[in-house]
Structure formats: C-alpha cells, structure tokens
Image (cartoon, helix red, strand yellow):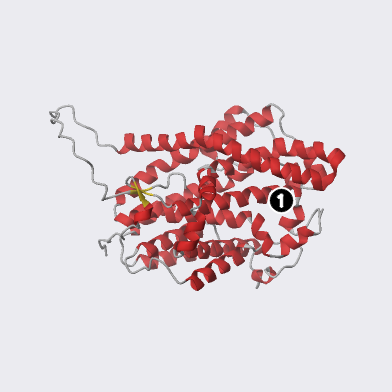
Amino acid sequence: MLVQMKPRRCEPSLIAVGKIRLEYLNGLRGLAALIVVFHHFAYVFLVFATRGAGANHFAIERTIYTTPLQLLVAGNFAVCIFFILSGYVLSYAFFQTGNTAAVRKAAVKRYFRLMPPILGSVLLAWAIIRFGLNFSDPAAAISGSSWLANFWPRTVSLGEAVYYGAYGILVGNSEPGVLNNALWTMKVEFLGSMLVFAFLALFGKLRLRWLVYLVLMVASWNSYYLAFVLGIALCDVTSRSWSPKELAWPITAGLALAGLGLGAAPIPGATSTIYSALGWQGADPNVVFILTHIVGAALLLGAVLYSPALKTVFASRPLRYLGRVSFSMYLLHLLVLGTISSYMFAALNVSHGYAFSLGVTGAAYLVIVVIAADIYTRHVDEPSMRLAGWVQRKIMSPRKSASKPVAEPKPYREPAMIGASRVHADNL
C-alpha cells in the first residue's frame, strides 16, 4: 500500500539558499576521518595498541588496546560511522519531500561523484611505485609492522591503475591493497549507496516498509551493509511528524556513551579485554567485531540527531572543515604514511630513538595529510561533485523537440525560497 508522506518541517537553522545543510553530520564525518588517520598511524608504529599482539614499544600500548582509549584509534568504528551516515544522508531528501526524483538524481550522480577522486588517488599511488618513492620497508623493519612491509606488494602498469581506479575498485573484483589499502571501503560504499536508492525507490512509500527493514537487517547482520539499512531507518524515523526534535539529555548521553562503548571494542587479538566475551558461542570474532561497531555507530548517530548540544559540538568550525576535506584525507593518508612519514621516521630513528622519531613524524604526518587533503579537495574532489551534477543534468534533463516552436521566455520572477530543497550531501 502506497501512502503520501508528509514532509517534516525543516529547522530554520538548517536551511541556506534553498539547501538543507546538515553541518553537524559533516562534522561527525570529519572526526571519523581523523580517527581513521590516527588508526593507520598507530597500526604502523604502535602495533600492539591496535592489534593486541606483535611489537610492543611502550607500556601505554596495552592500556590503549584494553581501555576506552581505543576510541582514539578505532578505525573500523569510524568506517561504520561513514557507512551509516551515507544511509542517512542519501535518504534525507526523499524522506523530507517524498519525491523519488531526488533518488533517481542521486543514483545517477553516485558513480561520477566517487570515481574521479578514487582514480586520482590510485594514479598517485602508481606514480609512487613507478618512481621509487616508497619508503615503507625501512620503517616497517623498525616498527615491526608486517602490514607496512607489504604496503605495495607489486608493481602495476599505468593501464592497470586506470582500470582499478575507474572500474575495478568500485564495481569490479580488483584488490585495492595493491595500490591503496584504504580503498577496500569504496566498493562497500558504492554498493551500499545503490542499496539505499533501490530501497527508497521500491519500498520508500510502502506503509509496511518496517517489515522490509527487518528483513534487510536480518539478511545483512553479518556485513557492513547493515549500517546502510540502519542509516535509512534512522532517517525515516527522525523525519516523521511524530518524531521529537530532541530528547532529554540523560537519554542522548546514555545513547552516546553506549555507542562509544561499543565503538571502543578493539580488533580481536591474543590479549584479553572486557570485549572478549562478545565473540561467544563459537561466532566468528571478526563478524561480532563489525556488528558491535555498526550498532555503536547507530547509537552515536541517534544521540547526535536528538541532542542540540551534540549538534552544536559537531557543527563547530574545525570539525566542519575536517568534514569538508574528509574524503580527501581518507584517500591520501596512506600514501603519505608510506612515503614521507616512513622516510622521516626511519631517518630520525637512526640518531634520536623511537619515541622522539614517533612524535615528530606523527605531528608532521597529520599536518601533511591535512594540507594535501585541502589541495586535493579544491582541485579534485569538489570538481568531481560538479562533474557528477553536470552528468546528472545531461542524462536526466528533458530533451526539447526541434519540431516544436520555442516558447516565448516568461518574465523573470523572484524564486520562492520555500519549497522542495535538496540535501547538501554531495560531500557526505
């Protein structure tokens, strides 16, 4: 049964020039991207802190692994936040307006919005390998990171790199670790986005769509696609007229703490933690690990959506800036880690020791990643958003028949600012 959905009135503070700007969600994504940057740095130079096994250079690494400090390097939890935000944001325009045209437009744009920045990062990785700028091996020998030692396992041709970036990583079966390990999430992101669009087109106006949510949750409970389903459901709930605009702070605080508590679950390792019991009854500990982080991300997002205080925090200028450059940070940080950071660490360690080398390299790594991301955002990422919009307009714009007379132009009228507005989510 199809029903006409009544869009929820948008908060005035979120409307700007006909676009709904959910800046606090951009800020949340920016913080998540920063955690991924921290995670991979620790994964290379503080191995025990992230794995609970392997090289252990400092006593604090055990503390990080076994306590809530794990949140600082909880890269998988941050990735789950990315996925659940995609499910929420890509559904937002539909649940606000009930207009399936927004779904079709977003679906057409998605590949062209993701592909150019991915291709650019792959070509940069190819150039690093081609011109011998990979310094990961000396740094890996010092830190004891087997992952860093296999950073770029083989050379690829330019043609292979173009194929990987334009097709193989997003929709094919290419192994992203050959050029950029971070790109393993891109296929999940693209297919998860298609899942969102398909759900909205087929079931978005169905009165009993909650049963479909349940079926999809059961079907995807052991995969990252569950995060997209939960993101759609959260958007659906918060867009209804009966949904409160905010909840009492003890409730949102409890949701946030529960979400962060689950998000702090570390990668299963040989070292026992309070989370070790989550892999009970013979379940795959890695599946439980992913499920724990997805549920934690859903609880955290729910807390943010119903808490004005948390919205204010995540809408702060520094986090909004990180949100703007977050996709570029994600795409480039491993390239910086395997080149400049590895070279600097290995060179400094010769005469200054592990701790000093780690501190200086870490500070430089963060600065370089942010600067590189800012440049990449301006010259690659943001142009790709414009390209996606141009492609969508070319594909979906109605074609005028040459045989029909051209109508006289109508006199200009000031456009109304109230009406169907679209989510400012191309960079989410």
In x, y percent, where is residue 221? 52, 64
Q: Residue at x 53, y 50 (%)?
A: 319
Q: Residue at x 55, y 37 (%)?
A: 374
Examine the image and state in which quarter residue 373 appears.
top right
In x, y percent, where is residue 409? 15, 31
Examine the image and state in which quarter residue 292 appears.
bottom right
Q: Residue at x 63, y 47 (%)?
A: 37
Q: Is residue 165 visible?
A: no
Provide the residue designation for mark 1: 42
In x, y percent, where is residue 358? 77, 45
**Considering depth in this image, is 195 or 51 the residue closer to the camera?**
51
Identify the residue at the far right of this view. Answer: 351
Tell whether 104 sits left or right of 69.
Answer: left
Secondary structure at badge 1 equals helix
Neighbour tally class for label 1: few under 14, some 14-19, many 20 plus, Cα within 10 Å: many
**Considering depth in this image, is 162 or 33 the residue closer to the camera?**
33
Q: Is residue 356 visible?
A: yes
Q: Is residue 165 above or below residue 34?
A: above
